Image (cartoon, helix red, strand yellow):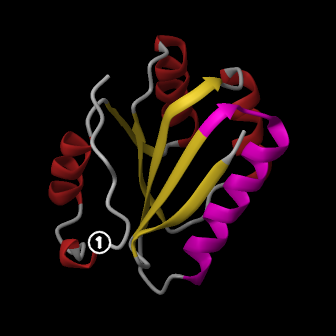
Amino acid sequence: MPYEISWYIENEIIYARYSGVQTVEEVRQSLIECNNFIARSPRHLVHVISDVGDITKPLRPVESLKLIREVGTHARLGWTIILYEKSILIKMGVAFGTAVFKSRNRTYKRIEDAIKFMKKADAELSWDKVTNPIQARTR
């Protein structure tokens, strides 16, 4: 599973884009990298946008939950936005994980809706400093 992780807004929002077949090891590594990005940021909360629209075979929700429990989430993780998820099973897994880990997650089909939500959720974000624009998709 190829993935790329970069700042969408430096020190404020991480953009993680995934594609192909997910493997346990690559998902583990991507979670560690996200935690490292958050650790290096001076901000009190760092949000994550996960673009999963190009994943062809996701991990089973049980495997994902096990990895999250194993790697852990950073104490300063804010909202996690899941973009372009097609599988109802995965959406249900996200909802379950949200309840179990008491995390802040939302899923959106459109980047415009995710940004609208984030502007309300965190009014202190520096939208004028977007460094990695996310391309809108039609699905």
Left or right position of 20 against 125:
right
Q: Position of residue 79 (x, y in %)?
A: 39, 53
Nearer to me, 139 or 68: 139
Q: Position of residue 9 (x, y in %)?
A: 36, 72
Left or right position of 38 against 105:
right
Q: Position of residue 82 (x, y in %)?
A: 43, 39
Left or right position of 52 against 127:
right
Q: Is residue 115 above or below residue 123?
A: above
Most extreme residue toward the bottom is: 42
Most extreme residue toward the top is: 88
Most extreme residue toward the right is: 25
Magenta stretch: helix, strand or loop mostly: helix
Residue shown at 47%/22% (left/top)?
A: 91
Label 1 SS: loop
Q: Is residue 57 above or below residue 127?
A: above
Residue shown at 59%/29% (left/top)?
A: 55
Q: Which residues are magenta?
A: 19-40
Q: Amino acid at mark 1?
A: Val
Residue under numbered circle 1:
130
